[in-house]
Amino acid sequence: MTGRLEGKVAIVTGAAMGLGAAIATLFAEEGASVLLTDVAEEAGQAAARLARPGLFLRHDVSSPEDWEAVGRAAVERFGRIDILVNNAAILIPGSIEDADVADWRRVQAVNADGVFLGCRMAVRAMKQSGGGSIVNIASVGSHSGEAYAAAYCASKGAVRSLTKSVAVHCQNQGYGIRCNSIHPGTIDTPMVRNLREGLGLPPESPVAGDPRQFAYAALYLASDEALLVNGAELLVDSARTVTPPAPRAS
């Protein structure tokens, strides 16, 4: 199938690289007009050239003012908003014993507050145009936990629960807006490889997937193929949360 998002308008945050760039590019290939946002301007501009017809805006997702500007830009440029992918996130390593309070608050501001602000903006815009799809990128960390990432796991747990609240609210109001979450396993990106190397974790375990493989999950939830999918958690983790990775050899 092609043209699965033909004529739709999408916003993808954290779209300068990695999963966000893969989602933005795939959406454009499937017919969507895409507004890419990120704090990394040079990489974001480059990603927008691949997601044609794409527009890039610098965007701090923890800023309510930035979200208002992004919403206005999408409507002014493309006429409406049909899809929002809340992908932007950060991970600052730290267990419950050594995580810094400032780092905790920064992770929550980007990963949890950013998704809240994005959902709020999207619901306000989408209900005016008859509906849409919100896709929140969470993590397997919200299911199984990661010892080295207390703040990150907590923030993704917030995304998991917020998604359900948004879905039920929009369903009750009859807005025609769906809200679902994707929970990826390990994604093969330079950031993840550097993180695992810094933590002394083996690069091959658990198995990492190419960003494009995860992007197809977002494409499905964004498309009309998923019109009856609302408030769902889509695990894309190669059975990681079903069968935990084997213990490391001593």
Image (tube, rainbow, N blue to C red):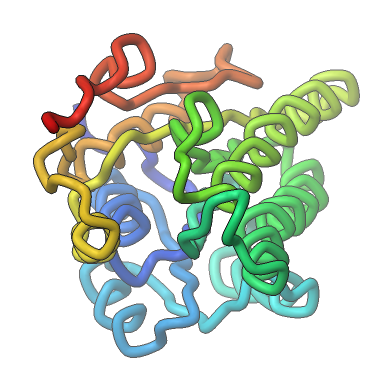
Question: Compared to 231, does 19 lie above or below?
Answer: below
Is residue 84 visible in this depiction of the protein?
A: no
Quadrant housing residue 228: top right
Q: Does residue 31 appear in the picture of this structure? A: yes
- The structure residue drawn at horizontal position 38% and vertical position 40%, both measured from the top left corner, is 5
Residue shown at the point (61%, 49%) measured from the top left: 96
Position of 148 with respect to 17 (left or right) is right
- Give the quadrant of residue 247: top left
Q: Position of residue 123 (x, y in %)?
A: 77, 45
How many discs mark residues in the rendered view?
A: 0
Q: Nearer the viewer, residue 141 or 70?
A: 141
Q: Picture quarter containing residue 43?
A: bottom left
The furthest residue to the right:
173
Q: Nearer the viewer, residue 144 or 109?
A: 144
Give the camera-side residue of 190 and 220.
190
* x then y, percent, for residue 218: 40, 37
Going 65% across and 40% down the picture, which residue do you hit? 159
231 vs 214: above or below: above
Most distant residue in the bottom direction: 42
- In the image, 103 versus 173, the foreground residue is 103
On-image quarter of the C terminus: top left
Query: In the drawing, does residue 167 fall left or right of residue 141?
Result: right
Q: Residue furthest front?
A: 250
> Image height check: is 129 above or below 11?
above
Residue 239 position within the rendered picture, expressed as x and y whole percent measured from the top left: 28, 15
Residue 229 appears at what percent x and percent y? 56, 16
Residue at the spot x=26%, y=54% of the render?
22
* Quarter placement of the N terminus: top left
